[in-house]
Amino acid sequence: MQRNGGGVGAGGQPWVLRRVRLTWLSFTLFFILVFFPLIAHYYLTTIDDAGGPDKRIFGPRPGGELCETKHVQDLCRIRESVSEELLQLEAKRQELNGEIARLNLRIEACKRSIDSAKHDLLQLKNVISQTEHSYKELMTQNQPKLSLPIRLLPDKEDPGLPPPRSARVCRRASCFDYARCPLTSGFPVYVYGAASYTWLDYIDPLVKQAFATAVKGSVYVTDNPNVACLYLVLVGELQEESSSSRPSPSELEKQLKALPYWRSDGHNHVLVHLTRKSMTQNFLYNVSTGRAAVAQSTFLEQQYREGFDLVVSPLVHALSEPNFLELPPQVPVKRKYLFTFQGERVESLSTRLQEAPRHSFEEEMGGDPPADYDDRIVGTLKAVQDSHLDQVLVEFTCKDPRPSSPTEWALCAEREDRLEVLKASTFALLIAPGDERLVASAGCGMRLFEALEVGTIPVVLGEHSRLPYHQFIRWNEAAIIVPKPRVTELHFLLRSLPDNDLLSMRRQGRFLWETYFSTSEAVLDTLLASIRTRIQVPAAPIKDEPVQEIPYKAGKIAETDTNLGDDGDLDLGPVETEPPYASPRFLRNFTYTAADTYSTWNRAPGPFHLFPHTPLDPVLPSEAKFLGSGTGFRPIGGGTGGSGKEFQASLGGNVPREQFTVVMLTYEREEVLMNSLERLNGLPYLNKVVVVWNSPKPPSDDLLWPDIGLPIVFVRTEKNSLNNRFLPWDAVETEAILSIDDDAHLRHDEIMFGFRVWREARDRIVGFPGRYHAWDVNHRSWLYNSNYSCELSMVLTGAAFFHKYYTYLYSYVMPQAIRDMVDEYINCEDIAMNFLVSHITRKPPIKVTSRWTFRCPGCPQALSHDDSHFHERHMCINFFVKVYGYMPLLYTQFRVDSVLFKTRLPHDKTKCFKFI
C-alpha cells in the first residue's frame, strides 16, 4: 500500500509541474493577447499625439490622403460633388416651398380681389342700367315719340284739291299736293312713256333720246306711278317738218287730260319743253295746263306763274359730253375784246340803224334818253366802238340771222363762229327782248349758255328778263345785270371791275355751266332739284361703294417693330382696347333743306358745301360728313389738353375721341403688303385697315395675314384702276382717311403727328411727300416737279390724310374726263385729288416733316420708277388745267415741323408741336 501511494506521489510530481506550466502558459498567452495590444495601442497613440498631425503613422489623415490610388481619388471627388449638389438641391427645395407658400397666399388674395371686383362690376351694371332707364324716362317725358307720317297714296278717282280762282294764280300752296310728297318719300318721280300719249311722236328724236338717257340715270325716277310724288310729261321740242301736221293746242289739251294720272287738273305734273334752237315753239301759250307746272325756255308775262313755273336752260349738248380740250382757259383775265355783241332785232331794226345819225361816245353820254331803249343801246354801243377807247366788237346786222321770237335779238352765224368770237371776249352782251312781256326767251338762254361755256362773263341789259333757275341761282355772282337805262354807264362799269372779281365771276360761271347746263343729265337733275328744293324734300344721298371682301387666313400675331415707334419714352397715344368706333354722322336732313330754301341768299359761301354759291343740290354726298371740327360740343372731362404726358396720351380738342382709317392700295406684291400691315401693329387711334386689291388675280391661297388686333378689310375691285383708291367705301366709317401706298415706310410717331395736324385743318390734304408745279416758259405749258424744295403745291396721296367727303367729290362730282385719263395712263390720281381739293377750298395742302425718303427699302419697283412716269404727269397737269379752265393749285411755303414732339423732356414738361 505504501508503494502504491508512494508511486503515485513519486510519479505525480511531473504531472503537477506540467499542469502548472500549462496554467502559466495560458496566463502568459492571455496576457499577451489582451494586454499587449492595449499597451501597443496606447504607446502608438502617444507617439502620434507627440509627433503632431504631420507625423502620424496610424491615425486618420486629413484631405483624403488614404485615397492613394487614382481610382479611389476619382470616387472620392464624385462623392464630394454629389454631396454638394444634394446640399444645393435641398436649399432650393426649401426656397421653392417658401415661394409656393407665398404664391398661395397671393392666389388667395387675388381670388378675394376678383370676388370683390365682380361684386363691384355687378353693382356698376345695375347703376348703369338704372341710369339708362332713368334717361329713357326723361327723354320720353321731354321728347314725345315721333313716328313717320302715314304715306298718303292718291286715289285714281280723287278729285284733288279745290280749284283755284284761275290757272294764272297757281302757286305751290294752291296747285301742288304736298300729301303725295312726304319728307320721307325720297321724292319718287314717274315719267310718262310713249304709250301714254301720241304727242310724243311729234317731238324731236334727238330731244327724246337725250331725255330718255337722262331719265335712266336719275336716282329719283320710279316705275311705280302709284307712289310717285311728281309726274313728268315731255311735250317738246317739236320737229320742224311736223309743224304743219302736228295736232292743234286743243288736241294737246285732250291728250293731257287723258293721261292716266292727270286726275282732271294735272296737279303734281310738270310739262317739260326742252329746246335745242334759239327759236322755239311756245305752243303751250294757248293750252290750258290746269295745275300742271311748265318748264321751258320761253315765257310770256301773262303765261309765266312766278314761283310755280320754271325757266330752264336750252339743251345744247343733247347726247354729247363737253370737250374740255376745246374750251379756252380762264386766264388771262383780259381778252382781246372788252365786250362783244352780234345780233339783229327781228323788227326791221336794220332800217332804223341805217337812218340813225352817228354820235360820238361823249355825245351819247350826255344825250337825252330816247323812248326806245333798244335804239339808245344801239347808238351807245356803236359810239363806244367808234371811240376806240377799248377794243370792242358790236354788229347789229347779220347775213344769215337765226330764227328768233318777236322783239328779240336774233343770233348771227353758226354756233362755231359765235364761239370763236366769244373766246376772244372778256364780256358778252345779252340784250333782253324789246317787249317786256317776253320775260324769258330761248335766244337769251342760248347766248347765256354759249358765254358761260367759253368763260365769257355775261352782261344782261334788261332787268325784266328771267334767267334760268333765277329763284335758286345767284346770278349776280356770275353775270352782270344792268337796267337798260344805264347803258350809257356800261363802259365805265365794265372798265372798273378788278381782275380778281372778273376771275371769280368767270370761275363761278364755269361752275354753273358744268353743274346745271352742260349735259342732258345735268339739265334734268337741275329741274328735279329745283322742284324738290321748293317743296323742301331732302336730297337722295349718294350711296357708299359696297365692299366685296376677299376671305383670307389670319396668321400669327404681328410683333411691333421697335424701329417704327419712338426710341425713347414718348407716348404716342393709347392703343385702343375697345372695339373700333365710327365718326359721328351728320345726315342731310330737313333742317338743311329748309336752310337751302329760305336762307340761301344770306348764307356766306364756304368751301365745305358742294355747291357753295347756290342752293341747288341735285345729288349730294351720302350722309354728308361735314368738314368742320366735329359737333362743337365737348363732353365734360372729355378732353385733357394739358401738357406733357397728358397731351401725348389724349387727342383733346373739340373731338377728343376720334380714329382714322388706313386705305392701302396694292397690286400683286404680297410680301410687301404683309410687311406694311405688320408695321401698323400697335398704331394708336387706328380704326381699321382697308386693303384695296387692285389686281384681277386673287392672292395666294396659302398667304397668312398678320393679326394686328384690328379689322383688316380685304377689298376686291372690278378693274385695275388707281381711282379705286378714292372710292367712298362703306367700310370706311371715319372722317379721317390715311391713304398710303403698300411700300410707304412711315414711323408711328410721324403718322400720329400727321393725324394731329390734320385735325387742325380738316378741309385740307395733310401729308408727307411734297411736290410742286412749274411753268415752262419755252414750251408754254405746266411741268410736274419732284425735286426737294421749300415751296410746294401738292402733297402726294401715297402718304396723306384727307376727309372722306372728298372721296364722294372725286368719284361722283369731279369731271369724268379726269378719271378717264387716270385710267388711261395708270397714273396721276394723286395730282387729280390735289386739283380737286384746291379747286374746292382755294387752299394749298399742308406738308408735315418726314425723312427725305419714306419708301420701303428693298421693295420691288413701283410704277413711279418707269421712265415715262414724269412725262405722263406733265401731260396730266396740262389736261387737268384745261378741264378746270385754270390752274387751281396754290403755292405755299408753310410746313409743319415737330419741334418738341420728340425732344427728350420729363413728363411734367411741355411736349407739344409748333407750326413753322
Image (cartoon, rainbow, N blue to C red):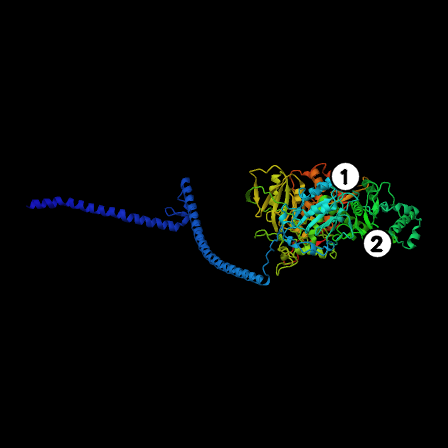
- Mark 2: which secondary structure? loop
10 Å neighbourhood of mark 2: few (<14), some, or many (≥20)?
A: few
- Measured as percent of width and height from the top left, residue 257 is found at 68, 48
**Residue labelled with disc 1:** 241
Q: Distance between the residues labelled 1 and 2?
A: 39 Å
**Amino acid at the residue labelled 1:** Glu
**Amino acid at the residue labelled 2:** Pro
**Residue labelled with disc 2:** 483
Instruction: Look at the image and tell me whether residue 86 can be seen.
Output: yes
10 Å neighbourhood of mark 1: few (<14), some, or many (≥20)?
A: few
Q: Is residue 130 above or below residue 423?
A: below
- Looking at the image, residue 755 sits to the left or right of residue 410; the answer is left
Residue furthest to the left in view is 1
Is 660 or 3 nearer to us in this picture?
660
- Mark 1: which secondary structure? loop
Q: Which of marks 1 and 2 is in front?
A: 1
Is 569 or 473 nearer to us in this picture?
473
- Looking at the image, residue 501 sits to the left or right of residue 710; the answer is right
Q: In which quarter of the image is residue 422?
A: top right
Q: In which quarter of the image is residue 774?
A: top right
- Measured as percent of width and height from the top left, residue 725 is found at 66, 43
